[in-house]
Every structure is written in structure tokens, then in C-alpha cells.
């Protein structure tokens, strides 16, 4: 049997917590706590469905037309979302990551972003996945190894689930006071308050009828973490918590998520340090000086385990 399409599968274990991380795009393909699935998985021998679990560096989301300007000079990125004419989800989604540290319950993977079309910078990046007693912690590192300041955004694309509860039975909670209105190309048109809209997720909203591909900001921190939650009817809750540097969260309901059983409904909650099209707006970008390193983290945990049989 040959190597799967997503490369080497890094299987982590800690008690009854297990995870699988892929060589391709350092993707989080599986996370289970006490028999409860916390992320939607996909076949190891298929490309990540809908960008599932992949690392989004050096920017998350989209760049309009793949074009932006650096010091007055136009830059043209490769269009990786040709159907909408955008550069999408950074430059490492098709890149294999090398292992730089490995243990039974943790793995560190690294990859370089080399200068290329529309991106005249050189970055070294890493991501460390570490299991905890109730989930997973993820630490991202980016170092500018070039000779000029470089703009950086970081994100990740996990699809969350609460065991076998259907996505449309879940309640999603995101504390964002504001959201982006987008056009038909999923690009921002304006930022508006969520108050009074169906997309207001601050007090929890049923996913039964919501169709979302929405970026939220104005997130409220609890104990120096921003927290997003999915709750099942039986009370089980999966939380994605993040460093406040992840000032944006994209919520995406995907009804064409491919699994071994066929297409299902899935919901991504994507932590992002900057909004869509940040290379043009400049909002939320972190400019790293030569040899400067930036470290941010986020995690997923199960807040309530299933009742004992």
C-alpha cells in the first residue's frame, strides 16, 4: 500500500485522548476524547475536504484577485481559488511539513514559506500539536528569515463536531459583536454590528436553519482567551479557545463536506489573526522584522463528557 494522499499520519495518544495530524498542510484530521469525536474527519487518502484542519499561513481566508501592493509595487499571487478569482488560505495548503520534534502525545511540524509569485518574503513556520486530558493545544510559530519586514497572518480550519450529534442539531456560540458582509466572491464589503441579525451568535444560535460563511470580530475574552462553542442537545459542548491575537473567527457551514460515508453537513470555526483580504486592508496584519519570531496558540477541548452508561 502506498503513502496516503495526505502523507504520513502522525497519531498522538494520551490516555483516552487521540489525534491524527497529517504531513500535508499539518492538518488536524482527527481528534477524539473519551470516544467523542471533536473534529470532523476525512479519508487519509483524499485531499482535505473544504480545507479541513489545515494551517493557514502566511494569511488566512482570501486575497481579492490575488493582488496587493507592497511599497507602491503591485504584487500578484497565484490564484488558488479560480472559481472566485482569489488567492485563498495562504501558501502552505499543498506543502508537506517535516517533523522537528515527536513524542507519544505531541508533535512539532515545520515548513518554510519561500519567496514566490506575489510574495517576496522568506519565513520559517512551525506548528505544535499537544494532547491534554480534555483535548488539544496548538502553538504556531513564524520567524522572518528574510532581510525585509514581512506581513503575516495565521489561521487554522478545523471543522468541529460533538460526537455523533448532527450538525443541524447543534447550537453555536461566538462572542463577536461585529461581522463582515461579503460579496458573491466571499470578499468583504463592509463591517456591521450583529445586533438584530440572524447571524448574531453571542447568546447561542441554532444551526438548524443557519447558513454561514461569516467572519466575526469584536470578540470578548474570558480569562484572557476568546472562546467559541458548539453544544449538543444532551449538554455536551466542544470549545475552541484561543489567544486574543486571534481577533477574528470565521464560521462556515459546509453542506458538501466529503467523508467515507459521502457528503455531510459540517461546521468550521476558524481562528484567524486577521480578516479576509488583510493584505489589501492591512487590518490585523503582524509585520515581522528580520529574525523576529511570533508565537500564538489556540486549542480545542470537550467541556462535558457523555453520561456514564
Image (tube, helix red, strand yellow):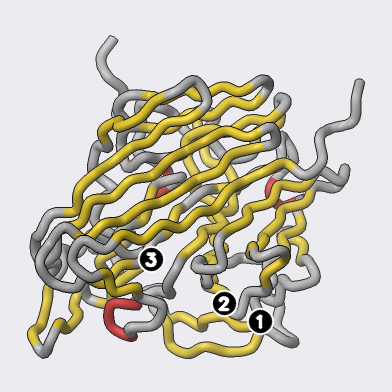
Of the 4 image quadrants, the one containing the N terminus is top left
Answer whether residue 192 is visible to the viewer in this image. Answer: yes
The residue wearing badge 2 is: 217
Secondary element under disc 2, as helix, strand or loop, is strand
Task: Give me the residue at 76% from left, 57% from top.
Answer: 171
Residue position marked by numbered label 3 in the rendering = 61
Q: Residue at the location (40% across, 27% down)?
A: 44
Neighbour class for label 1 at 10 Å: few (<14), some, many (≥20)? some
| Residue contact at pointers 1 and 2, CB within 8 angstroms | yes
Residue 80 drawn above or below residue 68:
above
Please state the horizontal and vertical placement of residue 225, each as a whole percent of the image.
64, 62
Picture quadrant where residue 205 is located:
bottom right
CA gap, disc 3 to disc 2? 14 Å
Mark 1, secondary structure of its residue: loop
Label 3 sits on a secondary structure element that is loop
Tell me the quarter of the picture where residue 292 sits: bottom left
N-terminal label among 1 and 2? 1
Q: Specify the quadrant that holds the C terminus.
A: top right
Amino acid at each position: 500500500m502506498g503513502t496516503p494522499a495526505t502523507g504520513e499520519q502522525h497519531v498522538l495518544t494520551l490516555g483516552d485522548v487521540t489525534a491524527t495530524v497529517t504531513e500535508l498542510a499539518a492538518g488536524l484530521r482527527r481528534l477524539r476524547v473519551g470516544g467523542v469525536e471533536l473534529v470532523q474527519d476525512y479519508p487519509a487518502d483524499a485531499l482535505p475536504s473544504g480545507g479541513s484542519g489545515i494551517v493557514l499561513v502566511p494569511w488566512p481566508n482570501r486575497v481579492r484577485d490575488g493582488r496587493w501592493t507592497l511599497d507602491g509595487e503591485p504584487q500578484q499571487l497565484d490564484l488558488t481559488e479560480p472559481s472566485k478569482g482569489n488567492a485563498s488560505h495562504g501558501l502552505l495548503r499543498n506543502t508537506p511539513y517535516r517533523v522537528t520534534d515527536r513524542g507519544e502525545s505531541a508533535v512539532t511540524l515545520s515548513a518554510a514559506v519561500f519567496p514566490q509569485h506575489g510574495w517576496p518574503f522568506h519565513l520559517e513556520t512551525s506548528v505544535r500539536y499537544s494532547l491534554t486530558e480534555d483535548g488539544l493545544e496548538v502553538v504556531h510559530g513564524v520567524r522572518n528569515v528574510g532581510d525585509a519586514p514581512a506581513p503575516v497572518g495565521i489561521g487554522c480550519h478545523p471543522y468541529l463536531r460533538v460526537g455523533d450529534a448532527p450538525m443541524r442539531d447543534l447550537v453555536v456560540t461566538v462572542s463577536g459583536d461585529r461581522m463582515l458582509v461579503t460579496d458573491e466572491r466571499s470578499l468583504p464589503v463592509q463591517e456591521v454590528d450583529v445586533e438584530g441579525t440572524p447571524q448574531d451568535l453571542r447568546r447561542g444560535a441554532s444551526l438548524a436553519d443557519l447558513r454561514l460563511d461569516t467572519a466575526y470580530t469584536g470578540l470578548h475574552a474570558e480569562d484572557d482567551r476568546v472562546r467559541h462553542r458548539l453544544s449538543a442537545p444532551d449538554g455536551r459542548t466542544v470549545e475552541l479557545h484561543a489567544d486574543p491575537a486571534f481577533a477574528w473567527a470565521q464560521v462556515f457551514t459546509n453542506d458538501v463536506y466529503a467523508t467515507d460515508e459521502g457528503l455531510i453537513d459540517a461546521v468550521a470555526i476558524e481562528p484567524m489573526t486577521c480578516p479576509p483580504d488583510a493584505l489589501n486592508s492591512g487590518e490585523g496584519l503582524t509585520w515581522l522584522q528580520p529574525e523576529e519570531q511570533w508565537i500564538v496558540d489556540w486549542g480545542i477541548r470537550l467541556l462535558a463528557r457523555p453520561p456514564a452508561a
